[in-house]
Amino acid sequence: MRKKLIAALSSTVVFSLVACGGQADNGTTAAGETTMAAGETLTGTAKGYGGDVIVTLTRSEGVITGCTIEGASETVGIGADALPELEKQVVEAGGFEIDGVSGATVTSKAVMKAVAAALGEEFVEETRGEAAVETAAPAELVEIDGGLQIGLAYGAAHGTKCFTEAYAVVQDDVIVAAYLDEFQFLDPNEDVKGVPNSDTEFAKGYAEGSVLCSKRDNAEYYSELMKSNGGSTVHIDVNYDAIQSFVVGKTISEVERAAGEENAVDAVSGATLVDTAGYLKVIAQAAKNAQSTQAVEFSGDSGNLKLSVVYGAAHGTKCFTAAAALTDDDTIVLSYLDDFQFLTPDEGVTGVPNSDKDFAQGYAEGSVLCSKRENAEYYSELMASSGGSTVAINNNYDAIQNHVNGMSIAEAEALMGRSDVVDAISGATLVDTAGYIRTIAEAAKK
């Protein structure tokens, strides 16, 4: 049985979605019921998420033998549920230097401060050097049957003038959903729609007379281009949909075998693209990538699942965001984030596919289009040196996804409206966290 990375889901999901992730086991002991050994009793208080968090310690011969935490105003299902685990961590650590509980950052920090106060010790938050970037500890590996995972891959499925984006959702090694799109530079004087921020700073990366476009968002225009240049009678988005439908229900190896057939396009009903095999290969790679991502258990009807992608401007004007959402009715089952930004090619970055071919003719001199996930180490160091960020960009994306997964669309929209949205998401430090949640919600509503 394959081991999978599991992520925590919101406790508000109505149907059977079970979260599994790097969170510690909260146990069953209610706050205030910890058995304490005889010894001196120490008390400390600190401000929590909704009010005071009060910690009572029992110490015998200098060793903490018991801990009780009271936090009546902490959030039900998040901070309140974390208290028993935090009690256990304090005893095991023998002080305030605990790991805390994922998803309950504010409550965890309040407990640390209260423990320090009880012990008469100074609480100093961990600080890191300006260029240091935190790599999150891997999630707990857990045996699971029926887990859903989502992955993304970029490729060069169709010539050298564009690059392909493919998402795949897998259940074990079977593909249950897929999504295709491509990006190409087109003439801005034509009736085309550029990607978000094509009218702001992002456009500084364009060569004169070029604008980066999603083929799906310009399906009518691009399909007419295909018709006039090659006589195609099937719209580009219809071709993508046909290929996506073909892979659903097939194993990764079956898709790879189909891609290896001499006339792969003949096997895909409704598809006419001569490069159909190339699209199948990129989807297969996305499916393989999915197998190393965090998973959720799903026991519903996979036929009700819908995978959608939108492009937005979640983070300023120098990049644009791609957000995918797998939904079951109004519940966000899985999500996935990435950003594209122009970087300097001599910085050792990896450009999107075909950045060394015809596609690069759309670049302004000294620019190369990059996926932030594909260049996470470089971009995270950039964030650290310019803004003091201590959490890698890909870890930020994952933290946001893991928090949103399992929420209803309405809950996600309510979350993004909170003034403390960054503090509410364990592991997220991006000031534009609300923008990323908004883009996921838009994908879910699409």
Image (cartoon, rainbow, N blue to C red):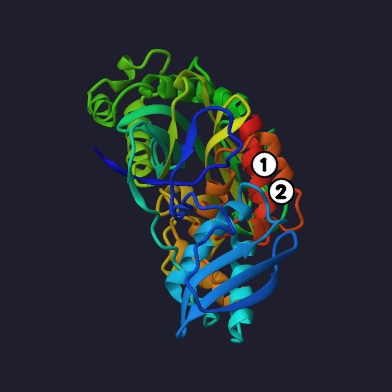
How much space separates mark 1 and mark 2, taking CA atoms?
6 Å
Hey, which quadrant is residue 218 in on the image?
top right
Q: Which of the image's four quarters has the C terminus?
A: top right
Give the quadrant of the N terminus.
Answer: top left
Q: Label 1 amino acid?
A: Ala
The residue that appears at 57% across and 42% down in the rendered structure is: 10
> Camera-side residue: 169 or 208?
169
Q: Which residue is mark 2?
A: 416
Determine whether label 1 and label 2 are within 8 Å by CB: yes
Q: Which mark is residue 412?
A: 1
Q: Position of residue 411 (x, y in %)?
A: 69, 39
The kind of secondary structure element at disc 2 is: helix
Kind of residue at disc 2: Met
Can I make out residue 75 in this image? Answer: yes
Q: Secondary structure at mark 1?
A: helix
Please state the horizontal and vertical placement of residue 166, each as a whole percent of the image. Answer: 44, 37
Q: Position of residue 47 (x, y in %)?
A: 72, 69
Q: Nearer the viewer, residue 12 or 279?
A: 12
Q: Is residue 284 above or below residue 374?
A: above
Name the residue rendered at 54%, 38% in the picture. 324
